[in-house]
Image (tube, grey):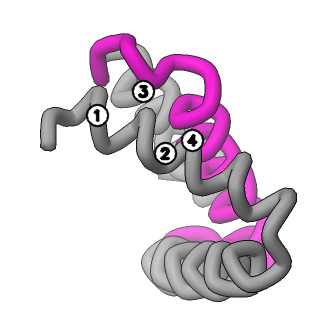
Amino acid sequence: MTKSGYRAAEGAIRVWSRVDPKVGEVQRAVDEQRFHVVAESMRDLVGPKAAHQFARLGYSVLVGFELLAADGGTDELAWSLDQVLQAALRFAGR
């Protein structure tokens, strides 16, 4: 599957999860696992409370990109996620 096909599938699954409770349950579990990985990755950089906030921001960027730019390139996504990382670094005083 191409990267754009993957993003299109992610978006379609998110729409499906809104109308099928079983799919929604799985989607929420996957989101929680992914979010946890991101938050844990940020914890040492910005502390536990801010890690949660920066993880939510970064994950929101990813999900939004999946839904809005399924056919677009990844340059914009990389730029957006880099902005989240740069904000976290500024927050941490680095």
- Give the amino acid at mark 1: Gly
Measuring from the top left, give residue 79's x and y in whole percent: 40, 22
Amino acid type shown at disc 2: Leu
Which residue is tagged 4?
11
Q: In this orientation, which residue lies closer to the viewer: 89 or 63?
A: 63
Helix or strand or loop: what does disc 3 sit on? helix
Amino acid type for the residue under numbered disc 3: Leu
Q: Residue at x 84, y 58 (%)?
A: 18
Majority secondary structure of the magenta segment?
helix
Residue at 62% over, 38% down = 61
Choose the circle earlier in sequence order: 2 or 3.
Answer: 3
Q: Give the distance between the C-alpha atoms of the residues marked 4 and 1, in whole angstroms.
A: 10 Å
Quadrant holding the N terminus: top left
Location of residue 4 by image quarter: top left
User: Could you tell which of marks 2 and 1 lies nearer the N-terminus?
Assistant: 1
Left or right relative to 6: residue 35: right
In this rendering, is residue 12 above or below 65? below
Q: What residue span does the magenta drawing correspond to?
A: 45-74
Task: Please state which amino acid type lies under the numbered disc 4.
Answer: Gly
Disc sitting over residue 85 in the figure: 2
Q: Nearer the viewer, mark 1 or mark 3?
A: 1
Numbered tag placed on residue 5 in the rendering: 1
